[in-house]
Image: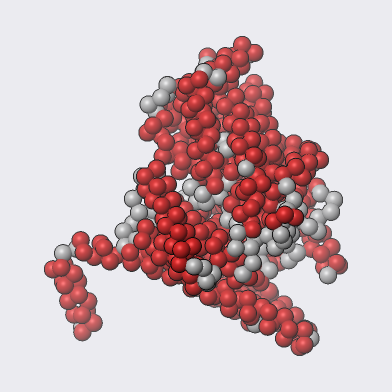
């Protein structure tokens, strides 16, 4: 799995960089100077890294690889799960705003992943929310971006319907 | 001179001014602990309050607040692998592995003490530099700045953790990522792919926190163990850290000197100086194999640099009214608002005010460090907190801090994007410091290059100071190749 990730990462870098350098074709010489001077040698270097990894992969003994792979795979699958939590935080924050997201996130994380008691999870969630509200909202006077579920209300129902009709008519046309 | 120094000290000791000074120190310590806030934001927040004070009260409060920020920002970097500011990422390189070994107390104490010594050294440097500032500034022009940036980026060879080719590729990617947004000469927007958010360059906070904090916090959860993988009772304490600093006093002095000099140059800032001093520490140390795995010298080298650099950046602000960073630009606003005009007049007619600033910086560093040092053993206990309590709390602080510093939900998306990149780079053995350093230096190199070629053509390469700096850069690259060979022989 490590090798697959290594190839995938290097290949993704090569593709993204190639696209970026293609986009840079249309720029004037001053704007494009550094992107080209840095970009092309790095593209070549990434290809060299990819080739080196392929050569190295062939030299590795199969038995060693499978043992290392199992541990690496287990750990990285775990990491993907926790990245899921992070993405969940952002989606919830986008929907309801950060002040409501913090207690929900901490409570559900501690309850599900740590299997803590209701009391421990709830008290941690409340304590952190109080800290965020006091420190940022009262002390630093921060106006957090509101969640779309709440701001959607502020657009009048008529405007929301208008946007909806516009969306469907664009689909039909 | 001595009279002015005494007058500055007496002003600071006035009860009301000293009270404000202490409040500033406490705010500074608090601000440093929260990742993503930093001195510039804190300064911007207190600005409306500070400009209403008289100069004698405003300056100690301001310096008291700004000075300990770079001391306390090492706390989250060492304890949870989340740098409080981009410059603390260098401290994290060895501080966090030390915490994992159960030596958080030692790492924290070493960080605090070396940071204080660096700050005091920087303040001392301001005092002795006043008469020789003008010729020094005239000596350094854009070609020297460009050469210094090249020197800083060649540190990538040493920071590549055993694979120079991947280190160079990571640095190249860092420079290219920094080029997203308007170019500095013609203001043509590059690689924004239609996104308004990308018209301005990517904010450094989500980049630094994404590359370093997110992978470490998620790894904590994925492994299911606390940061320190040993029993709380067997943790090494603060006295060891203090002894380490005293044992490495030459390193503290050399790092502080280099950092104060870099801080003095406009635009380079404390992040570049801490990484360069970290590299310097690796280069001059005899046994290099433990760097990046928990070598206390890495913490000492980086932390001595942070406060010394901040003090160094005050020199051009005070002597010429030329701010070298966003933070010193805000300080300049405060100076003007309270009736002080930085420049040659300040150095001749209001020397007592200059000494008030110097005393405030030096004493704030000492008091700030004393407070942090007293809390060291308690703070070290954080590394024993179970991962499923620590991780959600740390994640919340990192996400909130990022949202605060970017004021945009897309800042959080950037954080996650760089978090993913940081995780892939960490698990596949690519150098994250190389990418971060290049991300910071990329725009500076581009700007200095165009300014230099416009003013000097190609003759800038023949300037003796430029040649000297470029030879040093070649030396760093050679050192990187040597380290890679040695690592290859060992494995």
Q: Tell me if residue B25 comes above or below residue A55 in the rendering.
A: above
Q: Residue furthest left?
A: A158
Left or right of A55 on screen, residue B396: left
- Horizontal side, residue B75 vs residue A129: left or right: right
Q: Residue at x 68, y 31 (%)?
A: B121
Q: Residue furthest top?
A: B3
Task: Give percent across and percent down for residue B267.
Answer: 55, 42
Q: Is residue A10 above or below residue B157?
A: below
Q: Is residue A172 visible?
A: yes
Q: Position of residue A3 (x, y in %)?
A: 67, 80
Q: Residue B6 placed where, x, y %?
A: 61, 14
Q: Residue at x 50, y 33 (%)?
A: B24
Q: Residue at x 72, y 77 (%)?
A: A52
- Residue B206's place in the image compared with B324, above or below, is below
Q: Position of residue A111 (x, y in %)?
A: 48, 70
Residue at 79% x, 63% y: name it.
B484
| Res. B53 image quadrant | top left
Q: Height in image: B264 above or below B488?
A: above
Please state if B258 lies on the left or on the right of B284 as rendered.
left
* Pick the front one: B388 or A115: A115
Rendered image coloring scheme? secondary structure
Q: Taking the image as drawn, is residue B148 in sight? A: no
Q: How many marks?
A: 0
For the residue pair B304 and B163, the one nearer the viewer reads as B304
Q: Nearer the viewer, residue A68 or A102?
A: A102
Position of the N terminus of chain A, as image quadrant, is bottom right
Q: Quadrant of the C terminus of chain A?
A: bottom left
């Amino acid at each position: 799995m490590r090798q697959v990730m290594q190839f995938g990462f290097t290949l993704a870098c090569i593709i993204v960089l190639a696209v970026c350098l293609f986009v840079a074709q249309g720029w004037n010489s001053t704007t494009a100077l550094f992107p080209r001077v840095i970009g092309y040698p790095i593209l070549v270097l990434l290809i060299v890294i990819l080739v080196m990894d392929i050569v190295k992969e062939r030299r590795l003994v199969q038995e060693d690889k499978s043992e290392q792979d199992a541990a690496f795979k287990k750990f990285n699958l775990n990491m993907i799960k926790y990245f899921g939590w992070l993405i969940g935080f952002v989606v919830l924050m986008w929907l309801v705003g950060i002040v409501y997201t913090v207690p929900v996130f901490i409570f559900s994380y501690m309850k599900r992943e740590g299997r803590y008691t209701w009391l421990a999870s709830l008290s941690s969630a409340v304590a952190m929310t109080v800290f965020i509200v006091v420190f940022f909202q009262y002390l630093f006077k921060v106006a957090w971006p509101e969640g779309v579920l709440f701001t959607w209300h502020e657009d009048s129902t008529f405007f929301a319907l208008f946007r909806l009709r516009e969306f469907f008519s664009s689909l039909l046309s | 001179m001595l009279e002015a120094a005494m007058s500055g000290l007496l002003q600071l000791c006035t009860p009301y001014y000293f009270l404000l000074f202490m409040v500033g120190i406490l705010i500074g310590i608090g601000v440093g602990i929260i990742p993503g806030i930093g001195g510039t934001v804190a300064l911007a927040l207190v600005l409306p309050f500070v400009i209403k004070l008289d100069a004698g009260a405003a300056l100690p409060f301001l310096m008291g607040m700004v000075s300990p920020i770079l001391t306390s920002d090492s706390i989250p970097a060492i304890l949870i692998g989340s740098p409080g500011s981009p410059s603390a990422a260098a401290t994290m390189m060895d501080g966090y592995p030390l915490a994992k070994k159960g030596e958080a107390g030692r790492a924290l104490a070493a960080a605090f003490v070396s940071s204080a010594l660096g700050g005091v050294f920087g303040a001392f440097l301001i005092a002795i530099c006043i008469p020789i500032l003008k010729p020094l500034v005239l000596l350094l022009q854009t070609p020297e700045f460009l050469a210094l940036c090249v020197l800083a980026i060649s540190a990538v060879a040493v920071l590549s953790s055993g694979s120079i080719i991947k280190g160079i590729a990571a640095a190249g990617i860092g420079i290219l990522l920094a080029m997203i947004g308007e170019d500095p000469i013609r203001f043509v927007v590059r690689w924004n792919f239609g996104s308004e958010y990308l018209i301005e360059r990517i904010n450094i906070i989500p980049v630094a926190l994404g590359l370093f904090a997110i992978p470490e916090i998620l790894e904590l959860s994925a492994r299911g163990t606390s940061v320190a993988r040993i029993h709380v009772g067997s943790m090494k304490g603060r006295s060891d850290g203090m002894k380490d600093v005293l044992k490495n006093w030459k390193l503290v002095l050399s790092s502080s000197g280099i950092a104060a000099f870099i801080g003095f140059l406009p635009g380079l800032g404390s992040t570049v100086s801490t990484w360069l001093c970290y590299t310097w520490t690796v280069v001059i140390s005899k046994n290099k194999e433990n760097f990046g795995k928990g070598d206390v010298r890495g913490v000492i080298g980086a932390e001595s640099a942070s406060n010394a650099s901040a003090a160094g950046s005050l020199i051009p602000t005070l002597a010429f009214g030329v701010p070298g960073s966003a933070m010193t630009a805000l300080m300049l606003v405060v100076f003007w608002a309270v009736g002080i005009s930085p420049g040659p007049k300040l150095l001749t007619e209001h020397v007592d005010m200059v000494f008030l600033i110097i005393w405030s910086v030096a004493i704030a560093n000492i008091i700030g460090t004393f407070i942090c040092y007293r809390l060291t053993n308690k703070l070290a206990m954080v590394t024993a907190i179970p991962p499923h309590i620590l991780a959600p709390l740390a994640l919340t602080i990192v996400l909130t801090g990022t949202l605060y510093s970017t004021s945009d939900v897309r800042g959080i998306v950037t954080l996650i994007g760089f978090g993913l990149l940081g995780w892939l780079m960490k698990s596949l053995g690519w150098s994250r410091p190389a990418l971060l350093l290049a991300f910071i230096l990329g725009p500076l190199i581009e700007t200095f290059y165009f300014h230099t070629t416009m003013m000097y053509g190609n003759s800038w390469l023949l300037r003796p100071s430029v040649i000297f700096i470029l030879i040093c850069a070649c030396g760093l690259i050679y050192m990187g190749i040597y380290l890679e060979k040695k690592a290859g022989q060992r494995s």
